[in-house]
Image: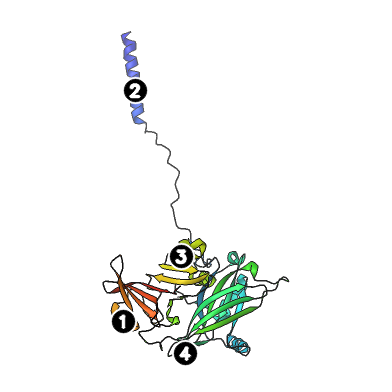
Amino acid sequence: MKKLSFLSILLIFIVALAACATPPVQPEPAPEVPPVTTPPVNETPVEDRTYTTPPFAFPIKGDYHEALAEAQEALHEKGDSQLFGLLIDNTAAWNDAIETYGFESAREGQTLNYGDAYFENYALLIVFADQSSSSIQYQFGKAEATDYLIDATLEQYLPEIGTTDIVMKGFVAGLEKETLYLPDGSPKPLNITQRTIPAVTDTPVDDLSIEDLRLGNLSVRLAALELDFRMAQKPERVETAQDGYEETRYYENGIEIMIIENEVFMISTDNPDYPTPRGLKVGDSLETLNTLYGEASIIETMENGNDLHSFDLSGEYHLFHAEIKDGTIVRLQVNLTM
């Protein structure tokens, strides 16, 4: 019995030594997880995602083009306000226009990459302004398809003193494709006109003119459709009043616009990118305001403690306002009167 016990103990000891000598079983390595990486950049240009849903319009520029100048001159013989344009409804035609006219965007950060995905439902209208002095400024008005034609307008703003250099300017507007063709499938004729807005420098400093009632590319009396093209974005919030008679739109870039009966009635902003025709902008000093517009017709203290400087048109209607805080303009507003 003792012998068996001794043998059993010896066997257990040998097994234990063998177990210690055997390396521990290593767990199977977990499957390698591929690192999270940024997808490789496609060498071909991606489609532009800034302005992809009409209506929109943005400026373009290019070098002087002789054939285009001849086409414009031929239209001028029919009427001084007629402008030349092209309707583009496919990628190949768009790329060809860019190469032919040497287009580039006149807006920082805006590319011209539109492809098949865009042209499936939409088209581009290129509107060429006159090839003229770079000091002449243009704003896109509107573009809409009627039963028989595509009607578009530009606004031309003349400076007091112009430069002599010649450049080509124009706009690209996005349109819904389904409205642009006649029953036989052919594109509707283009009717592109411009209206000229005179310089406001002849207006006495201490008086306003109707041309003063603009902030950036926005002006009172714009139709709602024209506003859509110029903003090229949907409002963040819309409030209605008077059973829909009044509509106030709030945009993420600091623009607030009231529309009454489908016409812009009031524009207000705290964005310095929307200057007045005289060059005043948010962030300027009270001294600059007085230099450009003279003394205010009335100064009121607002509920927030800021001062509101209001200016009148012909001594009767207060249509231009500057909110002042600590001697600095923090908001500008232009409006019509009831």
**Residue 111 in sight from this viewpoint:** no
> Which of label 3 and label 2 is nearer to you?
3
Label 1: element kind = loop
Kind of residue at disc 2: Ile
**Amino acid type of the residue tagged 4 in the rendering:** Asp
Q: Which residue is the extreme one toward the left?
A: 326
Which structural element holds mark 2? Answer: helix
Residue wearing tag 1: 295
Q: Which residue is mark 2?
A: 14
Q: Residue at x 65, y 76 (%)?
A: 149
| Earlier residue among tags 4 and 1 | 4
Q: Secondary structure at mark 3?
A: strand
Q: CA distance from mark 3 to mark 2?
A: 92 Å
Query: In the depicted view, which residue is nearer to us: 147 or 53?
Result: 147
Spot occupied by residue 336 in the image (x, y as percentages of width and height): 44, 75
184, 194: nearer the viewer: 194
Residue on which disc 4 sits = 165
Q: Which of disc 1 and disc 3 is earlier in sequence?
A: 3
Amino acid under disc 3: Thr
Q: Residues within 10 Å of mark 1 (few under 14, many from 20)?
A: some
Question: Is residue 268 shown above or below 288?
Answer: above
The crowding category of the residue bearing disc 4, from other C-alpha atoms within 10 Å (few below 14, some 14 to 19, many at least 20), is few
Q: Would you name the residue on which mark 3 appears?
A: 248
Image spot of residue 107 (x, y percent): 46, 75
Report the mark closest to the observer, 4 or 1: 1
Q: Position of residue 27 (x, y in %)?
A: 41, 36
Please tell me whether mark 4 or mark 2 is closer to you in this view. 4
Pick the front one: 132 or 271: 271
